[in-house]
Image (spheres, rainbow, N blue to C red):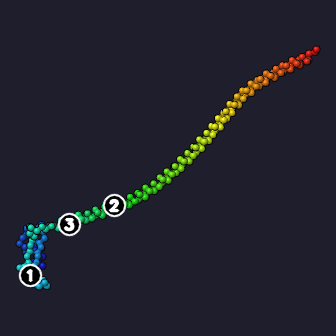
Amino acid sequence: MQAAAFRDKKGGNTGDHKDTHDPDYENITLTFRNRDQPRDSHLAPMNQVSAQPRPSSDTAQVPAWLHRAIMSLFVLLALTFLFFITLSILMLLKNSEMSRELLSLKRELWNATNAAQEVQEEQRMHWRAILQNSGEAMKGISEIKIKVQSGNEKLKTVAAEITQINKNTQKILEELGKKMSTQSTPQ
């Protein structure tokens, strides 16, 4: 029986040779066991061996290349799935790294903002002190200006008084001169 199947497969003694050149064609021989024959017997009578070169047209047989194509698609789908899982993991890792960097930048920005606010507060305090000191200086200057003006007025009065004193001393000197000249003249 095996020899007959081998001959049929090799193109030996078959009645139908039209499909032997088709790459998808495979000659399948089926053997049927006689019901009277025990299970252990390996030889089947020759009249019970039937070779069917092709299945009948009403049963649909799927070609082997279609199975390979479907398996290739499944493998491609699995690889695509693995690629997307790997890509998702990489995105999560990158997202985690970026989150850490953003938190670090946020802390640095917070520290810089606090430092800037402290500097601004110090500047405000310095400006207040400067304004207060300048106000006190302006007050002192205005007081000095008032004193200088009163001193100038006193100097004007002093000059007038000196002029008056000079006039008075001139009169006194003239009167003394007259008295001395009258005393020095004989009588």
How much space separates mark 2 and mark 1, taking CA atoms?
62 Å
Is 11 left or right of 119, judged from the image as shown?
Answer: left
Q: Quadrant of residue 126?
A: top right
Report x, y in % for residue 59.
11, 68
Amino acid type assigned to the residue bearing label 2 in the image = Ser
Give the residue pinned by disc 1: 34
Report x, y in % for residue 25.
12, 69
Give the residue pinned by disc 3: 68
Amino acid type assigned to the residue bearing label 3 in the image = Arg
Give the residue pinned by disc 2: 88
Circle nearer the viewer, 3 or 1? 1
Tell me, yes or no, if residue 167 can be seen here: yes
Q: Quadrant of residue 63?
A: bottom left
Q: Are there few (<14), some (14-19), or many (20+) residues within 10 Å of tag 3?
A: few
Give the vertical position of 24 relative to 128 (above or below). below
- Residue drawn 72% across the image and 26% down it: 156
- Report helix, strand or loop for mark 2: helix
How much space separates mark 3 and mark 1, taking CA atoms?
37 Å
Name the quadrant of the N terminus: bottom left
Tell me, yes or no, if residue 12 can be seen here: no
Report x, y in % for residue 177.
86, 19
Residue contact between numbered discs 2 and 3, judged by CB atoms under 8 Å: no
Q: Quadrant of residue 88?
A: bottom left
Q: Are there few (<14), some (14-19), or many (20+) residues within 10 Å of tag 1?
A: few
Is 62 left or right of 100, judged from the image as shown?
Answer: left
- Residue drawn 17% across the image and 67% down it: 64
